[in-house]
Image (spheres, helix red, strand yellow):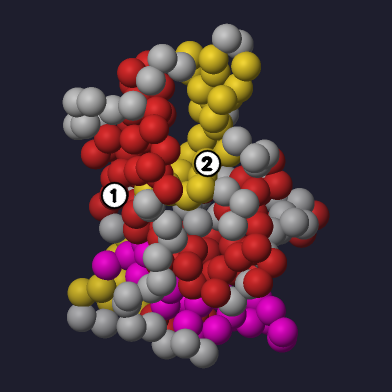
Amino acid sequence: MDTGLWDVIKGQGGIAPTESLSDNVEKGIVTYLQKNPNVIFLEVEEDLYKQFTGLMTPSKGLIYAVLNSYAEKDGARWKLRDEDIASVRRDEVKNIFNALEEIGKRLNYDSSLDDKVLTWSEKKKPAKKFYVLASALVNKALEQADEQTVLVIPGGRAELLAYKQDRDPSLKERLKKHRLVKYRLLRSLLEVTMLTRETFKEQIASDPVEKSTRQMMMF
């Protein structure tokens, strides 16, 4: 598993102390899919049940939510989507940083990059920060975020994040404090010829985490 891409921060026992069960299940499934292409649901479930026992056993609904976010189904078998292969997604993250820098330039901001956060500044003062993720592992991002921070995720993670926050009131409340923008909106904004700070603000305000439209097992 590409730990740099998927934001894995391991603590004692291999699990980050501040991460939620749903985050760790997400990482566990992606790791398994990277190592084992073309698997059936029961194989994924069996692998997870070895890692998460007792009260930590993940629901089928959560497992399906993660699979639907990262994988495509062919018959009974699941395979990691091409765009979610680590090297491909890493390149896409770079493209998003480039898009943010270009948009910032058009809006007369200076841009600086520090790990996963790109900051727009004006007169050397931060105006907006963008925390770019490849996953739906938002807990670490929220710990580091301030009131200026916008969370940026792939569109394919939106339903998974909606699923997580619908089952975690604390996460839902914390997400209310920050804008969340999908990759595709930023790409579309590059095509807007008369982009202003006001229209940018309006556009990112219209890109919420939607409710899941996919049928899932909700138990």
Residue 145 marker: none
Q: Position of residue 41 (x, y in %)?
A: 39, 81
Residues 49 and 206: in front is: 206
| Corner quadrant of residue 4 | top right
Residue 150 marker: 2
Judge whether residue 63 is colored magenta. yes
Task: Residue lying at the far front in this picture: please name it.
Answer: 198
Residue underneath mark 1: 83
Q: Amino acid at mark 1?
A: Glu
Observer able to see residue 3: no
Whichever of callouts 1 and 2 sits on the residue coming sooner in the sequence is 1
116 is higher (above) or lower (below) than 32: above
Q: Which residues are magenta?
A: 48-72
Instruction: Tell me the element at label 1.
Output: helix
Q: Amino acid at mark 2?
A: Val
Rendered residue at 40%/28% (across/down): 197
Rendered residue at 65%/63% (across/down): 173
Q: Is residue 153 left or right of residue 199?
A: right
Q: Is residue 64 left or right of residue 128?
A: left
SS majority, magenta: helix
Within-10-Å neighbours for mark 2: few <14, some 14–19, many 20+: many
